[in-house]
Each structure stands twice: as structure tokens, then as C-alpha cells.
Image (cartoon, helix red, strand yellow):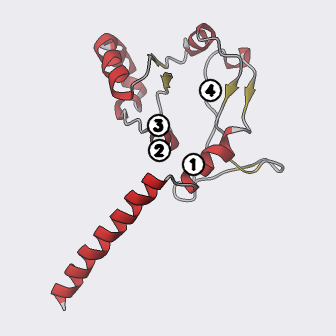
Amino acid sequence: QRAIFRIQPESWFKDVYQVDEVHFNDPNTINETLRNLGARQLLLLDVYQVDEVHFNDPNTINETLRNLGARQLLLLVGYFDLNNAKRAENTDSGSVLEPADFKGKSEFPFDTEMLYPIMGNLRVFKTDKELEVMRYSCKVIFISEFYIYSSSA
């Protein structure tokens, strides 16, 4: 398994991979992060149980992908309707999901249609464990609200 961390991870990245590396959000901290790469890399290898960790420097990610033998890039782009190519706009923030961009991206063939329907369904379909957690959470909320409203009556 390999993990490549983007400087600005999307919300889906945390949802799917359970990655919670908030300090990668600020491009100004990337140099500080790279200075501590040795210890940081070992920690991330252990935390996410992957074989390799590569930090995304926009100037070298194409070299990393070439070294990893990437033949095609699957880039996440949001569309409501692939036939009409309407951009998917976040109904809360109004932001639009744009594909990853980096120096040398044009050197690779890439697909921007395959991932969105798959990633969208990850939020719709739940495993038995996820459903169990959701049911438990609802039960706890119901019981706590019952006691709160009962005591205020």
C-alpha cells in the first residue's frame, strides 16, 4: 500500500482513508514538515499501516509518480451529470471539486470521470459496522434527549 498526501486534503480523503493530518492544509508549513520528514514519515507509516509515505511537493510529485510506475492517474472531479459535464457544487460551501493539479501532470494519461460516482457511493452505502455505529449513536442521542426534555418538564 502507498499513501501520497496532498497539501490540501479534500474532505472525502478523511472520510475514505481516515486520514487526519491537518497540518498538511497550510502550504506555508510544508518546508517545516519536510525538515522533520524522517520522524514524521516513520510515524505516518505506523499510524496508517502503509509501506511508503510520499509528501506532495508540487514540483516533484510527477517524479514520485514516475518512480512508482504510475501508468494512469484517476483524478477526482465532481460532476452532477457526466453527459452534460455540470460541475458538482457543494451545497453547503458553494465550492466546486477541481482535479488535482501539479507540475508535470500532462506527462500522464488521466481519467477524471471514473472516481466521482464511486467516491459518491462510499458516502451512501454503509457497511454493517458503520450502520451499527450509526444506530448506537442515534440510540445514545435519543436517550440523552429524552432525559433532558423529561427533566425540563
Q: Would you call the spot at circle 4 few (<14 residues within 10 Å), some (14-19), or many (20 or more)? A: few
Q: Outermost residue toward the front?
A: 128
Residue 78 appears in the rendering: no
What residue does disc 2 label?
Answer: 15
What residue does disc 3 label?
Answer: 17
In this rendering, the label closer to the viewer, 4 or 2: 2
Label 1 element class: helix
- Give the mark nearest the N terminus, 1 or 4: 4
The reply to whether dot 4 and dot 2 touch (C-beta < 8 Å) is: no
Amino acid type of the residue tagged 1 in the rendering? Leu
The reply to whether dot 3 and dot 1 touch (C-beta < 8 Å) is: no
The reply to whether dot 2 and dot 3 touch (C-beta < 8 Å) is: yes
Per the model, the C-alpha gap separating discs 4 and 2 is: 21 Å
Question: Which residue is pictured at 71% across the width and 16% down the height?
Answer: 71
Which residue is at the front of the view, 49 or 26?
49
Q: Position of residue 39 (x, y in %)?
A: 28, 14
Q: Compared with residue 21, is residue 80 higher up or lower down, i.e. above or below?
A: below
Q: Would you call the spot at circle 3 few (<14 residues within 10 Å), some (14-19), or many (20 or more)? A: few
Which quarter of the image is occupied by the C terminus?
A: bottom left
Which residue is at the front of the view, 102 or 134?
134
Q: Compared with residue 103, is residue 49 higher up or lower down, i.e. above or below?
A: below
Left or right: 92 as drawn, with respect to 96: left
- Give the mark nearest the N terminus, 3 or 1: 3
Amino acid type of the residue tagged 2 in the rendering? Asp
What residue does disc 1 label?
Answer: 122
Q: Position of residue 108 (x, y in %)?
A: 72, 17
Amino acid type of the residue tagged 4 in the rendering? Asp
Label 3 element class: helix
- Give the mark nearest the N terminus, 1 or 2: 2
What residue does disc 4 label?
Answer: 101
